[in-house]
Structures are given as structure tokens and as C-alpha cells.
Amino acid sequence: MSPISKLAVAAAIMAGSTAYLAYLGASTSWRYYLLVDECVHSRDKFIGQRLRVSGRVARQSLALSTDRSVVSFVLRGQQSAISVSCKGPLPDNLAEDMDVVVEGTVDEHGLLRGDKVLTRCASKYETRDGSLATGR
Amino acid sequence: MRIFGELCLLASFVGFGYAAFACLIARHDRWKHMAGIGVNTAIASTQALTMTLAVLAWALVNKDFGFEYVAQYTSRLLPWHYCLSALWVGQAGSLLLWTWLLATLSLIFLLTARTDSRLATTSFGFLSAIVCFLTTIMVFAADPMKSSLSLQSEGLGLSPLLQHPSMLIHPPVVFLAYAAWAIPSALAAAALCSGELDTRWIQLARPWAVFAWTVLGAGLLLGAHWAYQELGWGGYWGWDPVENGSLLPWLTGTALIHSLMAWRHRGCLKKSALSLAIGTFGLCNFATFLTRSGIFSSVHAFSQSPIGWMFLGLMAVLLIGGGTLVFLRRGDLSPQRQLSSAFSRESLVLFSACLLFLLTCVVLVGTLYVPLSGLFVGHMVQIGPAFYNNVLMPIGILLLASTAVVPLTRWGSAPSKGQRKSLLICGLPALAVPFLAACCGWRHPVALAVMSLSVLAVCTTFAGLALDAWRHSTTRHLFGVFLMLRQRRRLYCGYAIHLALACLAIGITGSSLGTRRHDADLNEGDVVEWSGRRIEYSRLAQREDEDKLIAEAELRVSRGGDMPVILKPARHLYLLQNQWTTEVAIHSTWTADFYVILHAGLGEGRVALTFIENPLMHWIWLGGWLAAGSGLVAIWPARIKRRRQGGQLRNARQSIALAPVRRRAA
């Protein structure tokens, strides 16, 4: 067997094993990534499933517990909204009117029970629309 | 001042466009004289760009809110160094910095290469075209000199999360790396266009590739350090799309540096080297697309912007153009020698390059899983860290194994008898150490494998050095070691980087497998015993700074009979932004980091705290800095006299080495 053939066999084994391991990792860690409107419209389909839902925190809806371990707010989409109750580590910059992604499950009452919130802070590469004009 | 900056930006936009045209057309003998004009135009344009950058920096430090950019990212109370850091925090400012770095590095490249070389001039033409592309974006889509719509008395301020020392260095270091990767890419494109596919382009590209690799590695490390200290979740890497974006060119860049070595020594892996050179810079543009398009969720800041798509377009042009050129030149890129042994050094390089390529593919697929699943399945699906970790673990161990044995291999043939014997001797401690560790209670197979391979890497490096010294010095062996380190500085810097990889593997394995966490609500005076430590919560102090309110818990932590350490985790409320930040407290030792997070005050001095023990974290930073230091030593230029001698020697050696091939071809 020539060195090239040996290396080709090794490469094929490596590629196959990598693909299998990647598949195993994906099958145990995948979750749906939805917008609020999709989540609300197909709610029954997603009950109990592990989801990530992207939307904007509605104004005057954010309520944080004193120890910052529990938060509730309304997550707004283009046409619909969903109530969120989240328990777990919260980002420091969580605020109203901010784009966030909530990870958790939807229950039969349509409440999104989250355990992780990711913020999509708009302050780094572009300030929020209108914030400068009003001289906040 | 603003108008002056705007005019300078416009001048550089036009100037770089012309410089690119002049340098590229100078490839033809009829237009050879255009090269000088193009270079002079580029020098003038770089000066204009420097002026634009200076104007923006001046406006930021002096808080001139007449600039919209300054009003968006600074405030009156912001310290001057964070005002200056706002230069790379915003869209337009970071683009300006990147463009300026690329323009400056391009000139340094031209000065250090021979300016009369056609290869260097054509490469410079490509680099000027990329600078022109970046200035076009600034002129038409992200103008850093834009004026404020109304008179501002106060700015919006800098995000508190970005007010951290690592943020003063991390972004410019990453932009420097992105700029530096453009040079090997331009050289590869120029070599393919001109057909000058000998080792000259490698001599020019190699130091820039090593520089870019080192700087990008340092940038990734600084980003990880910032995440570890500032984001307050106890980790340093979250497989976030933007982190992945910067990791991708680092992985392909590693494969590129090794492929260049294989080409130089054995005349093989030519197509891989050229494709990787172009692809790595393409992936830098892909990373920029991830950051600026706003299509992914990330701990990094995002906004919807058309700019990201322009970078995706540039990446597509680079990949399609580069791929086409490699295909058209495939006849000139066949290997000069076939692989002679599966255990030769070039086989090991090929094996490692394949592993790095696989890892790149996995990270790329994981990063793009959300939009790809939306496109092909109908529902967007995201995958978690398990996907990456499942693949990283075996590939990482195989990479560590190949770096561990490489000092005892040689180019062109299987290891010599002496090398094989040394490898067997080195294998003894590599087996003994994990055996002892297993007897002491360490049972995790991954931890034992990493331990064994790390010991093997250290032993083989010293064994390789000893063999070299023995071969080249007959009397004084210690002097021989010194001579070898001096004469083969680059080679041994490479081995030092391999040892740094072992340190990183130790740190990553320890911190992934051994992390422990404990949540506690404590009153003043409470004592907790956890993880062999006695933790006493003394008090909660509150004070006020100019721009923030600070709440700080004081903890006395002791372990065994050691002196207690005072740790002060805190929370800061930034008044302008009305935003809290978590300031963690860390006590680092070589065995573990003790990491404390203050979540909230619960009233009457009661606090909610989290304690985390992260084993072997020091080894990650040690590995990172060892790799960065070794990379910089490797590219440090040799003395001119020695370099000339070395060049002559190398040429003579190459002509001797290639003689049989030429004879066979004849």
C-alpha cells in the first residue's frame, strides 16, 4: 500500500468519524430557532419542545425580582406577542425595547418558560434608531 | 476639522482606486513605468487616510459632539482612553481603523519586499484594491466623518460592557490580524496571475502569515479573557457565531503555515497552500459579515446593516476567483516529489492540515446551521456546544499527538533509527505519568490522554534538540544546544508553539471537565465551607463614583492553613446608560481559579453569590502567551549579513536537493 493510499484511508476514517460525532452532538443539542410570530402561530406544534425565540422586549413589561434570578416580560414580534417568565442567569444589559433571544419551552397556556436570555445589544455597531435625535 | 477629514477620506478613496489600477496594469511590460506612479499614489493616499484617522481620534478624545460618531459612543464623563477605544467600537470607526491598518501594512510589505519585483507590485495592486473597497464602504455607507443632525451637549456614552482593559486591545489586535491576512492572500493571487509559482512568493508570504496567525491568536485570547472577566458567566468560550467567525481563519491559517513549510521543503501541498492563503482572508471577510450583517444572535453587538453583505460578496469573489486561478494553473502546481513514507514529516503535515480542515468545516456548519436549516428544512434549527465539543475532543487529541511526535520526524523519509529509539524512550514517561495519575484517582480517559501526550510533547522536543546538538557539535554539547537554538530559531519557535498547544489542551481539558459551581445567599458574617475553602462574607460596601454607583461584597477566602485572600465581587450601575454590570472577583493559582459572582443585594446586607471553581485556567493563558511570544520571535528578522549567507546556503541546498528531480525530468 503506497503512502498516499494509507493517508487517504486515514482521511476517510477521520472524515467519517467526525461526521458521526458531529451528528451525535447535533442530535442531542439541537433546538428550534423561531421568531415570535412563528412561535405564536404554531404554538401547539412546539409545546414542550426546546426552543430559542427571538423578539423585542415590550415597553413597560419588564419585571425583575430583587435577586435578579427571575424575570418576566412580554416578547413582541411583528404581529403578535408572547409572555415570558425566565429563571436563570440574566444578562446585565437586559432592558425594555431591546432585541433578545429567549431559550426555553412553551407551555399549554402559551407562556414561554425560559432559562436563558441572550441580548442582542444594538449599541456596539449602531445605536438604536432615533435615540440620538432625541438626545437621550 | 470634520470637512478636512471628509476630504482626506475622499482623496484616499480615489487615490487607492488609481493605485490599484496602476500597479495591476504595470504587470505588462508596456506599462511597467506605472508601478512607481501607483506606489507613490498609494503612499499619498495612506497619508490622507492617516489624517482622517487622526481627525476622528482627536474628535473622540476632545468629545467633539459635532461628529455623529463621537456623540454615539462617548460622553463627557468617559475617561480619555475609553474615548479613544470608541474608535473601534462603532461600525464606521472600526472600518476606518481596519482600512488604515491594511494600508499601512501594505506599505510596510512593499518596503520590506523588493519594490522592483513584479510579484510584489502586483500583490500591492491587489492590496490597494481591497483598501479601495473598504474606503468605498466608508464613503457611501458608513461615513465616520458624518455630522450630528442637531447640536449635542452630551453623548450617548460607551456601553459599560466595553469599558474593560481587554477591550482597549482586543478589537484593534483582531483588525490588525485581518489586515495582515490580506498580504499572503494578495501574494497568492499575484503568484497565480503571473505564473511565478516558485518558492519566492513563499519567502514573502511566510513571515506575514506567521505574524497574522500570532496576532489573531492573541486577539482570540484577549477576547476570551474579556468574556471570562466581564460577562460574568464563568466561561471564556461560548461557541458564539462571532467567536467562531474569528476562529475559522485561525484554523485555516494554521494549516496554511504548515502547507507553506511542506512546499518549501518538499515541493508538495502547493494547491492547498495557495487555496488556504486566499481562503483565510476570505474567512476574515466572512467573520466581518457575521458581525455586521445582524442575521445571528450573539453576545457580541449586532444591528441590521447592508455592510455585512458587501463583505460576503468580497468573500465570494475571493473564493471563486482564487478557485478558478488554482484550477487554471493546476498543471504548474503538481508536486515535485511524491510522498515517500506515511511517517515522514510532510505526511504528518498533510494529516494535520486535514484535521484542521475538518475542524474548520464543523465550525462553519455549526455557525451556519440556523440559516441553512431555515433554507433547506423550512424551520430554523440551532445546535448547542455539544455539537462542537464532540468533534473538538478527538480532533484536538489527534492534533496534540501529531505535534508531540513531530520533533522526532524528518522531511522526505521515515524517522531515522536514532529518532525511533528516542521516540520509544520518550514514550516511557508519557505512559508512566498518566499511570501514576490514574493510581492517584484521575480516571477520565480524555484527561489521561491529554496528560500523556503533553508529557510526550515536552520529552520529544528536548530529545529532538539533543539529537540535533549531538549531530552538529562533537565536543561541547551544551554549546551545541545553544547553537541549534540560534541557528534553527524558527524551527524551535515552532516547537515552542506546539508546547503552547499542549498547555492550552491541559487548560481546556481541566476547565471543561472539572468545573464546579455553588450558589449561596449570605448574610454579613456568614461562613461557608465549599470545595476545601473557608469563605467568610464580611460586609457589603456601597460607594459612588463620578459616572457610576458601586456595590461591593467583601469576602475572606482561605484554603487549608494558607493566608486568607480578600475578594471583592461587585456590581456597577452606570448612571448615563442606567445599566448594571457584574464585576467578578477571581483568585487565580496554577491549580484552579476561584471565581465569585455577585448577582444582587437582597436588602439589609444580604447578597446572592455564585462560587465557581475552574481548574487549570492559568494554563490557557500561559499557552496563549507562549504561542504569541514564540510567533513573534520566529518572525524577528535575522541579521542582514546572516540572512544573506543563509539565503545563499539555502539556495545551494535547494539546488542540490532538486538535482535528482531535474535529472529525472531531463
Image (spheres, coloured by chain):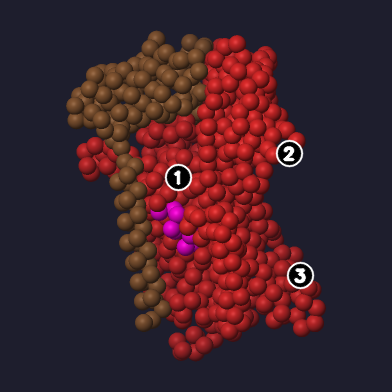
Chain colours: A brown, B red
Q: List the residue tagged with mark 2.
A: B561
Q: Is residue B398 magenta?
A: yes
Q: Secondary structure at mark 3?
A: helix
Tell me the mark number nearer the camera, choosing from 2 and 1.
2
Q: Secondary structure at mark 1?
A: helix
Q: List the residue tagged with mark 1.
A: B244
Where residue B80 sits in the image (x, y, percent)? 68, 25
Q: List the residue tagged with mark 3.
A: B482
Q: Secondary structure at mark 2?
A: loop
Against B483, residue B354 (above or below) is above
Identity, as a three-letter code, of the amino acid under mark 2: Gly
Q: Which chain does tag 3 point to?
A: B
**Which segment did they paint magenta?**
B391-399
Please rate how many residues cluster around mark 3, counting C-alpha atoms within 10 Å: few if below 14, some from 14 to 19, many from 20: few
Disc 2 versus disc 1: distance between alpha carbons?
A: 43 Å
| Residue plotted at (34% across, 42% down) | A29
Q: Earlier in the sequence, mark 3 or mark 2?
A: 3
Where residue B119 sits in the image (x, y, percent)? 54, 63
Disc 3 versus disc 2: distance between alpha carbons?
A: 43 Å
| Residue plotted at (45% across, 37% down) | B291
Identity, as a three-letter code, of the amino acid under mark 1: Asn
Residue B250 versus residue B455: which sits nearer the camera?
A: B455
Q: Is residue A21 left or right of residue B600?
A: left
Q: Earlier in the sequence, mark 2 or mark 1?
A: 1
